[in-house]
Amino acid sequence: MITIKHEGCIFCVGCSSVCPANAIEAVGTRMEIHPEKCIDCGLCVKACPANVITLHKGIKNCRDLPREDKDDKK
Amino acid sequence: MKYDHDVIIIGGGPSGSTFARAVAAEGMDVLVIDKRKEIGVPVRCGEGLGQREVISQGLEIPRQCYSTEITGAKVIAPNGKSIVWKDDNTKGWVLERKIFDKWLCELAIEKGAKVKTYTRALEVLKDTHGKINGVKLSHGGREPYDIHAPLIISAEGMESMMARQMGFKTVHSLYDVDTCYQYEMKPYNHENLIELYFGNKIAPRGYVWIFPKCDKKANVGIGIGGNLINGKKGGSAYGATEGTIDGAAPKHLLDEFIKNNEQLKDASTLVDFGGIISVGAPIDEFVKDNCMVIGTAAKQVDPIHGGGIALAMESAMLAASIVLDAYKEKNYSKEKLFEYDKQWRATAGKKVAKRLMLRKVMEKVSDDDLNHIFNSITDHDLEQTMEGKFAGPVAKIIAGRPQLLGVLSALLPGKK
């Protein structure tokens, strides 16, 4: 799954326009991730101009995220 | 069945508002929804717009919608040589998108369209036969509700989530996008020219732009090829593919450019923004039964400069004329709406296809060759190139450096 550091997000929706799995959506004023749809492809990580998306390969559950990224899970 | 509206437009940007204005003026019952709290905000755009396109639509842009007028363009080669191109075709504006988008939207409202902000489309609704007949909406995350209409227009821009649900292939590949970062900066002494800096070191497969704004302000931005980015957090998990540039994040490169620019290195930033631009080919089909895609959602964007406003407004007007025809017969079948697809590809589509060809050639050219190209051509050649007449400029370039023929031959007629 991926996490987004929302503080640095410039809300450009670039990540969701390249996401082949429709796993990121702009909701209200922030990007929301659907971990169950994410296929770990990392395209959003590369497309993000603000460099705020991190890919955690193989992790499917928020509980298994590294501690510093837990706050960014949504 | 009983419909709530004649047409629902998803997205209140330039294409959505232009379309709404055109069809509402002829008496159609129009609903425009926009997921943003405020039309036009946040701005994710370089804000340049050519005058020619707007005049051809019979619109007069009020003074408050643009920050400054521009007279031409200045293109700068990697070695610093510049070409200034100034004529009637290069006149334009640097807009204030917040105000411009709202103004376009207001024009639609004045013609009778209904606009709802902070309203997100959650789902495209279909009847028991699989025919699209409405959308599920939610206002600010509240209880969802259904709205029905015989025609749904996706004018969603880059994101195009509803267009995907309608079955259009609007997902972008990294090769066909540029990822961009932009600052609004002050002070910058400009000459009311758009400045474009080329070079594989400065901006691989793209350019740095400086768009002048009023009161010594300027939009300073960078766009680089989406597939070239590597060395970013998490990106390296995939290993570097050949040709990627380590650490080539747009913000990083833009900061580097600003540091090396005499005027900008001490300037302050007023706004940080960014986004990704489509620079690929338009999608394969723009229409299906009871739905259409217009503007950037259909990837109707200029592959050379990434500008989408003019093309979006143009395609919205075309789509509106076809829809009005369909409205008279109450027939929104794919066959009826296909005329929009056909006419767009016969007009604007041809221009976009040529620009795409040019982009694909440009990305193969090295810095040294770029310097040579800028040395050989004049502003007149630039104009020819942008109009799609490549033969003259290519001949001049090849005369001095025949080895470029291999790359540039793709632009010559009779070759694929």
Image: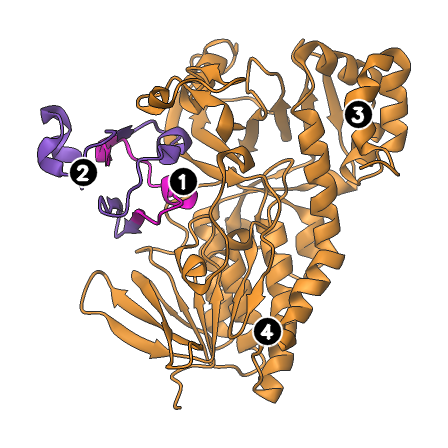
User: Which residue sits at x=69%, y=35%?
Assistant: B71
**Front in this rendered view, residue B233 or B296:** B233
- For disc 3, the marked residue is B408
Front of the two marks 2 and 4 = 2
In the picture shown, does residue B135 fall above or below B50? below
In the picture shown, does residue A39 fall above or below B16? above
Q: Is residue A7 magenta?
A: yes
Q: Colour of chain B?
A: orange
- For disc 1, the marked residue is A14
Q: Compute the Cα span from label 2 to label 4.
A: 41 Å
- For disc 2, the marked residue is A60
Find the magenta span and give its range: A1-25
Tell me which amino acid carries mark 3: Leu
Is label 3 on the same chain as label 2? no
> Mark 3 Cα within 10 Å, few/some/many (few <14, many 20+)?
many
Front of the two marks 2 and 1 = 2
